[in-house]
């Protein structure tokens, strides 16, 4: 399966006859006189009777969807011998085999889509359509004129970009309210797939709140993404990126962003950034020149059925607090590792991604009510948000420290060792941290299936602190419940993160 950003590359020859492109001007200051944006928050008509044509909606929306051409110029140096492109070879052999080393510039063109959202030329599109571009131009569907575009703001965490063209009385789309969407609502996707020209496709909303990243991938890139995608079966292809996803009233409810496909063409699984999320990013750029995001200071994770049982939760909804940053807003409000956040300002939280998105759209410095679950009791605390600044040796098996065949237990197939000074330094463990280093995990074990990996540090088992390898052995052998909770510390890219794992104790190792 491939995750594909839906914009297309174009050969330089295909655009050779195009008019000259004016260079992009990046600005970081606030835009004066923030433009008026039309918004319609009324619920859509969900009458099941379908009409014979969507033509009136298309006529309303299509003029607002534009083509965006982005160009990148890449400099390269020519050598007779390809090996001489490596500076190491030139260092030893000099330039006698290198040729003249002339520098050439190659041009790479890309095509995407965008949506006009104000009468005076502000445009929303996908960040990946224009990020890194040296030149950008915009073409309106009913106007052969090509406009040079200025970049108002690029926001990689949401994959949203805001552009501006110098034009007046443009056909601006009306924005809807993506929070009111429901699975099954009819939607239309408008864009320019494969560069063949503006195309409209119809489908329904297949799912809401989708994330395209594996929650077990604990790298920093994932932790700074804000993904709350609308999934649709309306055909989206390369070139549709940045185009419009509209409801049956013709209101913009999403920005088309990506597809999942084994072939590279639409397989009926497309994703769009919700307009409420994109609008929050745009208004941040227009009002203050940046996107100011609320910061809670926790490391959240999703909850599965095993974790729900382990924490005594009535359902698997909410976001589990894996770790709390020292002196963070959450820490000052009394939140702790092991709490489960179920609501923010009475808005239910479905999971870790949903929590990140909700908090990111709240104003830094604002006070929010956080409802959480701890020790079988639902509690509420008030948090004043901050601002987010986007960020081997042999061992003994846990099941038996002797050389005898291991006995089956909760952590069968896991090998651990004590932490020494060298390991602490290599893993950059927090001062005073205790635990047992995982040196091997049988790929067929229950622990591996739950996500435990070599290099993890087990710090708790069933809420009991792990002092060393022997403690991990003892607590693993004594676990009698169907599932056990394992709290780990994992080092990723020079930084540490904490996670809870639910290990099934009802089936034997494969």
Image (tube, rainbow, N blue to C red):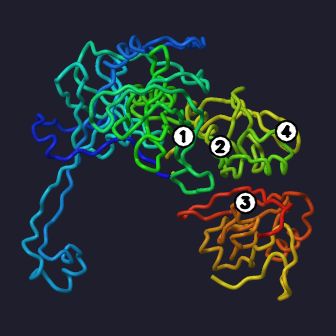
Quadrant of the rendered structure where residue 219 is?
Answer: bottom right
The residue shown at (67%, 40%) is 351
Residue tagged by mark 3? 450
Q: Nearer the viewer, mark 2 or mark 4?
A: 4
Q: Height in image: 124 above or below 356?
A: above
- 3D distance between C-alphas at marks 1 and 4: 26 Å
Regarding residue 221, the answer to whether it shows in the image is yes
Q: Secondary structure at mark 3?
A: helix
- Considering every residue shown, the one lying at the far left of the view is 100
Residue tagged by mark 1? 227
- Assess disc 4: are there few (<14), some (14-19) or many (≥20) residues with their C-alpha within 10 Å of its C-alpha: few
Residue tagged by mark 2? 352
Q: Is residue 98 left or right of residue 56?
A: left
Q: Secondary structure at mark 1?
A: loop
Residue tagged by mark 4? 314
Q: Is residue 413 left or right of residue 255?
A: right
- 3D distance between C-alphas at marks 4 and 3: 21 Å
Circle nearer the N terminus (2, 1): 1
Query: How many numbered marks appear?
Result: 4
């Amino acid at each position: 399966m491939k995750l594909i950003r839906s914009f297309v590359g174009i050969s330089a020859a295909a655009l050779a006859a195009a008019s000259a492109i004016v260079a992009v001007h990046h600005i970081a200051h606030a835009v004066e006189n923030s433009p008026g944006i039309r918004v319609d928050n009324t619920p859509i008509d969900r009458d099941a009777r379908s009409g014979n044509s969507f033509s009136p909606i298309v006529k309303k929306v299509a003029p607002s969807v534009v083509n965006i051409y982005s160009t990148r110029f890449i400099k390269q140096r020519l050598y007779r011998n390809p090996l001489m492109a490596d500076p190491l070879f030139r260092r030893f052999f000099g330039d006698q085999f290198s040729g003249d080393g002339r520098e050439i510039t190659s041009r790479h063109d890309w095509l995407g889509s965008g949506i006009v959202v104000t009468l005076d030329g502000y445009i929303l599109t996908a960040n990946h359509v224009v990020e890194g571009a040296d030149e950008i131009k915009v073409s309106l569907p009913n106007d052969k004129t090509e406009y040079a575009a200025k970049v108002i703001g690029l926001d990689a965490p949401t994959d949203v970009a805001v552009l501006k063209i110098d034009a007046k009385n443009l056909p601006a789309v009306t924005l809807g309210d993506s929070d009111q969407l429901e699975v099954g609502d009819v939607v239309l996707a408008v864009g320019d797939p494969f560069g063949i020209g503006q195309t409209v496709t119809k489908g329904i909303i297949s799912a809401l709140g989708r994330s395209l990243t594996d929650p077990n991938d604990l790298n920093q890139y994932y932790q700074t993404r804000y993904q709350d995608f609308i999934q649709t079966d309306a055909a989206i292809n390369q070139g549709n990126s940045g185009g419009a996803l509209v409801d049956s009233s013709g209101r913009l409810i999403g920005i088309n962003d990506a597809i999942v496909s084994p072939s590279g063409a639409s397989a009926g699984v497309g994703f769009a950034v919700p307009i409420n999320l994109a609008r929050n990013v745009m208004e941040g750029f227009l009002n203050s020149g940046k996107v100011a995001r609320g910061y809670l200071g926790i490391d959240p994770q999703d909850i599965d059925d095993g974790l729900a049982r382990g924490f005594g939760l009535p359902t698997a909804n909410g976001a589990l607090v894996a770790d709390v940053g020292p002196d963070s807003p959450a820490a000052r409000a009394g939140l702790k590792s092991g709490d489960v956040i179920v609501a923010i300002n009475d808005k239910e939280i479905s999971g870790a991604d949903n929590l990140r998105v909700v908090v990111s759209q709240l104003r830094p410095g604002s006070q929010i009510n956080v409802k959480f679950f701890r020790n079988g009791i639902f509690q509420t605390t008030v948090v004043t948000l901050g601002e987010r600044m986007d960020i081997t040796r042999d061992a003994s098996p846990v099941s038996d420290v002797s050389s005898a065949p291991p006995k089956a237990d909760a952590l069968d197939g896991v090998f651990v060792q004590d932490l020494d000074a060298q390991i602490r330094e290599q893993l950059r463990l927090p001062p005073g941290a205790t635990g047992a280093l995982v040196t091997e995990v049988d790929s067929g074990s229950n622990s591996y299936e739950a996500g435990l990996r070599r290099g993890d540090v087990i710090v708790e088992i069933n809420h009991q602190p792990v002092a060393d390898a022997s403690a991990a052995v003892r607590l693993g052998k004594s676990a009698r419940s169907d599932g056990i909770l394992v709290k780990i510390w994992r080092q990723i890219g020079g930084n540490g993160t904490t996670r809870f794992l639910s290990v099934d104790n009802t089936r034997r190792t494969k």
